[in-house]
Image: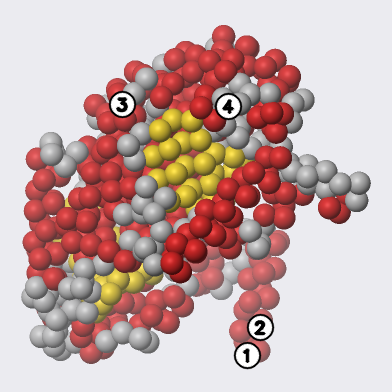
Amino acid sequence: MIETQAFSKLKPLAESIKQIHLKSLFTGDVNRFEQFHVQTEHLLYDFSKQKINSEVLHELLNLATESDLQPWIEKLFSGEKINQTEDRAAWHTALRDINNPLTEVAQQWRKMEHIVDLMHSHQLRGFSGNAITDVVNIGVGGSDLGPLMVTYALESDKLSIAPEIHFVSTLDARQLQRLLKKLNPSTTLFIIASKSFTTIDTLSLAETAKEWIEEASPSNESTLRHFIGISTNPTKMTEWGILPQLQLEFWDWVGGRYSLWSSIGLSIAFKLGMRGYKDLLAGAHAMDIHFKTMPFAENIPVLLGLVGIWNTNFLDLKAQAILPYDSRLKYFASYLEQLEMESNGKSTRRDGTATTYRTCPVLWGEVGPNAQHAFYQLLHQGTERIMSDFILFTQGQSNSERAKFHQNLNIANCLAQSRALMVGKSSKDLNKNYPGDQVSNTLLLNQLDAFHLGLLVALYEHKVFVQSVVWKINPFDQWGVELGKKLAMDILAHIETHTTEKLDTSTAGILNTIWKQNNEN
Ligand code: F6P
């Protein structure tokens, strides 16, 4: 990045624009919105509340070109092995080309559709012969967050014949135990979702779930009817006991955090039907086509990525807030936390050298109207410069007067906050002084349905990819999480043998305190 001509030109531009208050960019230019927004059939992206001008935008687009973004996009879509540290492709885009699927993808859709049909026609039955009423997805990270986020967001599209869907991810098992108290083992089905089928979090919960079924079930054969497996590792699924007809597969070229488009999305298909699930894929595919074909100046993921790079690497912003103005997107920020930070939270470049510039900012978020009464104080008057993404939908809940009122209130609040962050308000009393000058994006979509949600998620996936290309990092591996996993197993061995030998004094001290307190209880 720093070797490019665009970088050298952008550096001084940043120093001068830093001196200009964001609101002055508006007062000096009545066409600002016209100039800095892109609108497609489904989506409006307004980046006029960013500290950019046409010269900056021009150089950012040059930065993308000089970073070989177009050839990288082509590599992504062609299924080339661009995840070079794991020697794999990152071909999630191939999962959502619904009219032109790969043979193996179409085959899994057929198997998935069969299972979904059995479920919806009440032919999936447990050990008692009663139809399944509840499905529990056990998985973590990418095997949890995507389906959780989507099924929660699209609750109002749930088919009447669909079972209740639940999610369990945390290895302390309290979440699972709390849920099991409400469920009947004879009518509960578990989806064991794990790309690797080796993740201890998921497998330990799966064993606990199996014990729960076993306690009520008459035989091992009937117990196993309560478990569907989804993985890239059929051998491990079989070893665990998943019946062949209840195994769904996907492939190593699908990254965990990009896997909701694969059979990992089974819980989505249970809730919405295959049609709803495919609408989600179709929305993502529409964004794929946009990303692949539009010139950079009109390409929303490219612009979103470049604006983020401008803020991070030139204006020195270190944090990014995700603020959907729709309670149905309750889990959207959690989903993006993994997508963005597990992908681009890296400091080694593809060529093995260390980066000399900042990469992924800290990203967090919350449903906007709730966040207004929680952390917006820091956005308005704190010491940190934060970039925010406001996400808003045009359509309200219904045409009733009450629903329209709530929708208007919601729109007003969203626009008020991005405006307040931009303009601020000066006061001699510093307690009441709002500096403003905080940048934001606004994404406006027509409505929140499967298609638009697919489009929105794919937009962020491609934004992450654009940034990784400019930063010259591989967004598709996650070596950073391995050390913690390994140390957890080492410490578990210490706990089970009750020794603290070779542990640091902090770890040993905490373990000794736990053992002492447990003995006293
Ligand atoms: O946290 C690391 C990670 O490997 C994620 O990338 C992944 O989504 C999650 O663990 C779960 O992995 P698996 O689906 O293999 O159980």
Please give the label number shown on residue 517. 2
Q: Which residue is mark 3?
A: 292
Of 67 and 14, the residue lying toward us: 14
* Number of the label disc, if any, that sits on residue 32: 4
Query: Could you tell me if the residues under marks 1 and 4 are in contact, i.e. CB atoms within 8 Å?
Result: no
What's the residue at 54%, 44% (across, down)? Answer: 389
Image quarter where the N terminus lies is: top right
- What amino acid type should be assigned to the residue bearing mark 4? Arg
Q: Is residue 168 above or below residue 299?
A: below
Which residue is identified by label 1?
Answer: 521
- 515 sits to left or right of 241: right
Which residue is nearer to you in this view: 298 or 192?
A: 298
- Closer to the chain start, of discs 2 and 4, is 4
Q: Amino acid at mark 3?
A: Lys
Q: CA distance from mark 1 to mark 2?
A: 6 Å
Q: Secondary structure at mark 3?
A: helix
Q: Please report whichever mark, 1 or 4, sits nearer to the chain's N-terminal start.
A: 4
Q: Amino acid at mark 1?
A: Asn
Q: Are marks 1 and 2 in contact (CB under 8 Å)?
A: yes
